[in-house]
Image (cartoon, rainbow, N blue to C red):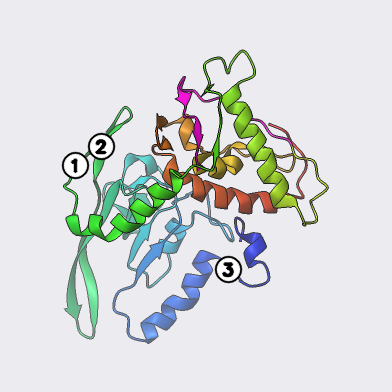
Amino acid sequence: MVWDFQHLNGKVTTRDIVQTAEAYVPLMKEQGADLIVALSHSGIDGAGQTDMMGNASLYLAGVEGIDVVFTGHHHNVFPSSQYDGIEGVDTEKGTLMGKPAVMAGFWGSHMGLIDLLIEHDGNEWKIISHSSEARPISERIERKVNPLVESDAAVLASVQKTHDETLEYVRTAVGQTDAKLHSYFALVADDPSVQVVSQAQMWYTEQMMRGTQWEACRSYQQLRHLRQAVAVAQTITPTFRLALLPLKTLQIFTSIQTPFVPLKSPVRASKNGLNGPLASSIKWNLEKLTSLWLTQISRPTTLM
């Protein structure tokens, strides 16, 4: 209801995570559930429970009737020392409010595993003991990611078609430039590689606003230079087209710092255009920031 407000407003009603659980868990018990596992896309925050809080997994675990919590959203690992000192959190036992819980990092970095020893007691099952861990799938040394497990051929095969289609799409040329683009002198002078992105962004922004109530608004932007001193391929690919929104700053933005991948990951130029880790994340950033942009439209102007 924040990121996708313009699509969901008036169509979807949401309510607090904990309140929702308190309403449904008793119903689930009445319908015969022995154990209830909460799959919570919500982080762990011990600052105190508030209505509609985004990181509510700790307080969700406190709901009577919930036995296990799988949590996430923070992109951290639990159990780990990152959550030491929070009341209700036991990082050694891997529990939230005494309930076994796990958070498995991000981008498939870990596998969250909870083992339960249960026994039948009269007419119900009870948890006698438990353990929780987040097993690493890979290790990151500097910028290199080394796998700690073998790939599963069946999983690779299941996504191969989508993977190939994605690569084909992002490597499809959408324009040409006769000038070689680089970012060698971006810190001291106008930069041609930044300029072409800037022009494309302004065009894209105008298309977005055309026919809307904001059509007459002026837009401003600020581009960061590429940290890598690399020559950008002469073929302009959808990478640029999809990168337009994550890189721009409009007058309607307040203080948005975008986690744009090229600033942290290598960008490689090839005959097929730009490729690398950024390709898979640009569309996601574009969609989310487009939604965020529309929710920020009425806020005060702050140029970064």
Q: Quadrant of residue 252?
A: top right
Please state if 302 lies on the left or on the right of 239 as rendered: right
Q: Quadrant of residue 279?
A: top left
Quadrant of the image containing the N terminus: bottom right
User: For the point 51% across and 44% down, which residue is it?
Assistant: 238
User: Which stretch is magenta?
Assistant: 220-237
Q: Earlier in the sequence, mark 3 or mark 1?
A: 3
Secondary structure found at label 2: strand
User: For the point 33% across and 40% down, which residue is it?
Assistant: 81
* 218 relative to 102, above or below: above
Question: Residue 218 — which label?
Answer: none
Secondary structure found at label 3: loop
Disc 3 to disc 1: CB gap under 8 Å: no
Of residues 261 and 127, the one drawn nearer to the viewer in this rendering: 261
Which residue was labeled with disc 3? Answer: 15
Which residue was labeled with disc 1? Answer: 148
Residue 176, position as x, y percentages in the image: 54, 35
The amino acid pointed to by label 3 is: Arg
* 76 relative to 115, above or below: above
Secondary structure found at label 1: loop
Residue 242, position as x, y percentages in the image: 54, 45
* 233 relative to 39, above or below: above
Quadrant of the image containing the C terminus: top right
Q: Residue furthest right?
A: 216
Disc 1 to disc 2: CB gap under 8 Å: yes
Question: Residue 139 — which label?
Answer: 2
Please state if 14 lies on the left or on the right of 22 as rendered: right
**Would you say residue 216 sits in the magenta stretch?**
no
Q: Is residue 272 visible in this depiction of the protein?
A: yes
Residue 289, position as x, y percentages in the image: 59, 48
The amino acid pointed to by label 2 is: Glu
